[in-house]
Image (cartoon, helix red, strand yellow):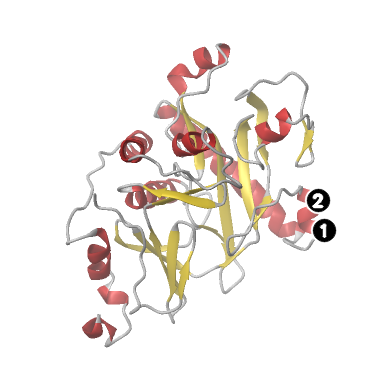
């Protein structure tokens, strides 16, 4: 299987490894972001899924282009299916999660907290008697602290964000307003594809001039929860989980077999990994309306990326690669 488990290139400068993406900061202020095939949940890497990195990069590209009139973004170029070159940003220390439904499986999700008996969550009041995966009256923002270096995201309220100095009031007003507009556009386009965009997360950063730009990814199957619109009503009425193709597919498999926050993660069988790869390909096609054709040039995914990044190597380093 052509899997990109890591993307370390010693010839490139200023390397940083995240849970899923690996980054290189160039001297001219650009950042190379390579999306691997790793899948992360519960603040841990669970497995590597063939073609996932390319699919996420290309889905994000679709959405960056579809929302460019709402929010400026960090994108400069796409030299490879797994790679985006963007402006280097100072990432704001708050993740903006927008939710349209009472859903989720993680400790920070509103459904998990609602089931624990909480009725004021992220500073927002919830009515008694709501059901799993029920539509909210209006989309809400449930921000969390942005965890760096493998830390845990922590729930925040809008007031806490400003009080703690994480964002200025003006910054919070801008990113929250922009996030709701992005989510509305996402739900509109998803509905036209027979999908429900149930929730998603956004990350923003500031450039060298202090402008706030949309960063990271947008409306991908890893950053968002999508459901099949056609079967949602009947499944909701029956108390069944909505049909989806997001990373709940892997998350649910793991959560059914261990406590993913404290137990060792069991090895995920090959057939589950391959099924997940097909889910990601289906997601790409339904979201974008385009056929997914993996780029199988080069001896491996990593070799192909190395060749496509040749123009970004510092002079002389390519000859030594």
Picture layout, residue 305 above or below residue 222: below
Label count reads 2
In front: 130, or 152? 152
Describe residue 145's horizontal placement relative to residue 18 as left or right. right
Describe residue 77's horizontal placement relative to residue 209 as left or right. left
| Category of crowding for the residue at label 2, using alpha-carbon neighbours closer than 10 angstroms: few (below 14), some (14–19), many (at least 20) | few
Q: Secondary structure at mark 2?
A: helix
Picture layout, residue 115 above or below residue 204: above
Disc 1 to disc 2, C-alpha distance: 6 Å
Which residue is disc 2 drawn over? Answer: 159
Picture layout, residue 39 above or below residue 106: below
* CB-based contact (under 8 Å), mark 1 and mark 2: yes
Residue 260 percent across, percent down from the top left: 56, 43
Q: Residue at horizontal 44%, vertical 34%?
A: 249
| Category of crowding for the residue at label 1, using alpha-carbon neighbours closer than 10 angstroms: few (below 14), some (14–19), many (at least 20) | few
Describe residue 125's horizontal placement relative to residue 52 as left or right. right
Q: Residue at horizontal 44%, vertical 41%?
A: 221
Which residue is disc 1 drawn over? Answer: 163
């Amino acid at each position: 299987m052509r899997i990109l488990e890591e993307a370390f290139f010693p010839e490139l400068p200023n390397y940083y490894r995240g849970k899923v993406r690996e980054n290189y900061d160039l001297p001219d202020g650009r950042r190379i972001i390579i999306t691997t095939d790793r899948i992360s949940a519960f603040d841990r890497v669970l497995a590597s899924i063939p073609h996932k990195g390319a699919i996420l990069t290309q889905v994000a590209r679709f959405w960056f282009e579809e929302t460019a009139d709402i929010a400026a973004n960090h994108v400069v170029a796409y030299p490879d299916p797994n790679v985006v070159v963007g402006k280097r940003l100072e990432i704001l220390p708050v993740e903006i999660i927008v939710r349209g439904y009472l859903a989720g499986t993680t400790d920070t999700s509103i459904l998990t907290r609602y089931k624990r008996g909480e009725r004021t969550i992220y500073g927002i009041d919830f009515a008694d008697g709501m059901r799993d995966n029920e539509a909210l009256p209006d989309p809400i923002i449930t921000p969390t602290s942005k965890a760096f270096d493998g830390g845990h995201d922590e729930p925040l309220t809008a007031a806490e964000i400003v009080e703690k100095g994480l964002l200025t009031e003006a910054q919070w007003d801008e990113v929250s307003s922009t996030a709701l507009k992005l989510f509305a556009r996402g739900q509109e386009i998803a509905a036209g594809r027979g999908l429900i965009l149930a929730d998603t997360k956004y990350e923003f950063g500031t450039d060298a001039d202090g402008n706030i730009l949309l960063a990271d990814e947008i409306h991908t199957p890893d950053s968002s929860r999508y459901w099949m619109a056609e079967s949602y009503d009947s499944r909701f009425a029956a108390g069944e989980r909505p049909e989806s193709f997001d990373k709940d597919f892997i998350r649910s498999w793991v959560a059914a077999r261990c406590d993913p926050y404290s137990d060792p993660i069991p090895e995920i069988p090959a057939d589950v990994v391959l099924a997940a790869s097909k889910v990601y390909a289906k997601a790409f096609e339904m979201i974008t309306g385009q056929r997914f054709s993996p780029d199988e040039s080069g001896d491996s995914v990593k070799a192909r990326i190395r060749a496509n990044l040749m123009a970004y190597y510092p002079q002389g380093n390519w000859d030594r690669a």
